[in-house]
């Protein structure tokens, strides 16, 4: 009896070890962009492509919008240490630890798509070499549109550098701090995830941000005044993996990631419609603001009519008020 129980127990234990050994390895992908950004949708498609190619051998799972609590400015610190298996990176956020990386494409120095397309392959080569120095392998890229940076302000429109000198300005890159400081403007780096609260609470008065993406962070709610500032070509987002991990990764996983990343780059490395999308975004922001004013006025009218209905003495007056309320509500 004891022999049977021991044999049975050993069999169950062996089965458990076998099952645990075939559980798919999960790679966590840290995406600091909000889920509402177009790039996040493209990254989600990248995740799907990789997982389909791996067919259960391993899985990628994306965590967007800083949900893992990993500051994007600390990527070169947490990624090589294995805090996550994979992370999106943007060189402009890494100027504190790697000034050379944040200066590869200086804000405002490239003003046309033609100039940018000539430079992009060299930019990728520089990124690959520099990230390797930090123990990070560049395994994929996501192209960023040719953007137009605007200055969004909370209290009043700002249309000159002179007017901006009296404001506290949010920026996202080291070279922006240096540029605006040289112009006499108080600029500080505030992460995208903290920008909304910083504007609402008055930590800053204005923020640099592309109008194209303003709606994805509800920027118009706290900074309704915007003025175009400069065109912005940017180096691409980089998908990074710790080099020591990448070197140990099985070839089938590497191949699935590299192939999906190539498709991702080909899909996003398109710039022909960027200006039209920018103009449409500006128009949409204006329409949202006008809608907000219309809704506010409508609420005031309804409130006043409600007061008339409550305190009006004549039946004819009340009937007229009821008619107006029906018109305004329905």
Image: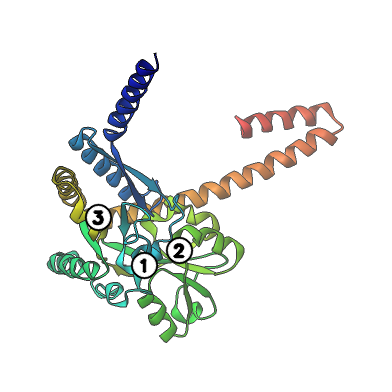
Q: Earlier in the sequence, mark 1 or mark 3?
A: 1
Q: Residue furthest right?
A: 313
Residue found at x 44% / y 60%: 192
Q: Quadrant of the C terminus?
A: top right
What residue lies at 79% left-to-right and 33% top-to-bottom?
309
The image shows residue 162 at horizontal and vertical percentages of: 48, 82
The image's colour scheme reads: rainbow
Disc nearest the viewer among 1 and 3: 3
Question: 330 and 100: which one is in front?
Answer: 100
Q: In the rendered view, tell whether residue 207 sits above or below residue 276.
A: below
Q: Quadrant of residue 181?
A: bottom left
Asked which secondary structure carries label 2, the reply is loop
Residue 127 position, x and y percent, is 21, 67
**Contact between labelled residues 2 and 3, with CB atoms less than 8 Å apart:** no
Label annotation for residue 191 = 2
- Look at the numbered discs 1 and 3 and tell me whether their residues touch, using CB distance below 8 Å: no
Asked if marks 2 and 1 touch (Cβ < 8 Å), the reply is yes
In this view of the protein, can residue 270 be seen by the observer? no
Between disc 3 and disc 2, whose residue precedes? 2
Q: Secondary structure at mark 3?
A: helix
Q: Which residue is mark 3?
A: 245
The residue drawn where x is 34% and y is 66% is 76
- Dot 1: element: helix
Residue 150 horizontal side relative to residue 237, left or right: right
User: Quadrant where the N terminus lies?
Assistant: top left
Q: Is residue 189 above or below residue 241?
A: below
Quadrant assignment, res 241: bottom left
What is the number of the mark on residue 93? 1
Residue 50 in the image: state x and y as whole percent: 22, 41
The Cα atoms of the two marked residues, 3 and 2, are separated by: 28 Å
- Name which residue lies at 72% across and 29% down: 322
């Amino acid at each position: 009896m004891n022999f049977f129980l021991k044999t049975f127990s050993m069999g169950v234990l062996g089965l458990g070890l076998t099952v645990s050994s075939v559980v798919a390895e999960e790679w966590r992908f840290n995406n600091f962009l909000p889920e509402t950004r177009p790039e996040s949708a493209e990254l989600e498609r990248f995740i799907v492509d990789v997982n389909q190619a791996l067919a259960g051998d391993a899985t990628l799972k994306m965590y967007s919008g800083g949900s893992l609590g990993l500051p994007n400015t600390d990527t070169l610190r947490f990624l090589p240490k294995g805090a996550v298996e994979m992370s999106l990176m943007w060189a402009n956020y890494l100027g504190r630890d790697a000034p050379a990386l944040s200066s590869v494409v200086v804000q405002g120095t490239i003003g046309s798509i033609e100039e940018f397309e000539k430079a992009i392959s060299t930019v990728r080569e520089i990124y690959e070499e520099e990230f390797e120095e930090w123990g990070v392998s560049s395994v994929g890229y996501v192209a960023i549109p040719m953007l137009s940076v605007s200055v969004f302000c909370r209290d009043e429109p700002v249309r000159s550098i002179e007017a901006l000198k009296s404001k506290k300005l949010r920026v996202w890159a080291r070279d922006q701090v240096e540029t605006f400081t040289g112009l006499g403007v108080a600029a500080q780096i505030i992460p995208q995830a903290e920008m909304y609260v910083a504007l609402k609470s008055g930590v800053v008065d204005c923020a640099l941000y592309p109008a194209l993406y303003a709606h994805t962070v509800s920027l118009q709610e706290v900074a309704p005044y915007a003025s175009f500032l400069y065109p912005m070509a940017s180096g691409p987002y980089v998908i990074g993996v710790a080099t020591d991990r990448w070197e140990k990764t099985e070839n089938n996983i590497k191949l699935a990631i590299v192939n999906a990343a190539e498709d991702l780059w080909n899909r996003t490395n398109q710039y022909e419609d960027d200006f039209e999308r920018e103009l449409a975004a500006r128009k949409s922001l204006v329409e949202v603001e006008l809608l907000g004013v219309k809704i506010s006025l409508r609420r005031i009218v309804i409130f006043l009519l409600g007061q008339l209905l409550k305190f009006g003495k004549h039946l004819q007056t009340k009937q007229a008020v009821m008619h107006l309320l029906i018109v305004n509500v329905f």
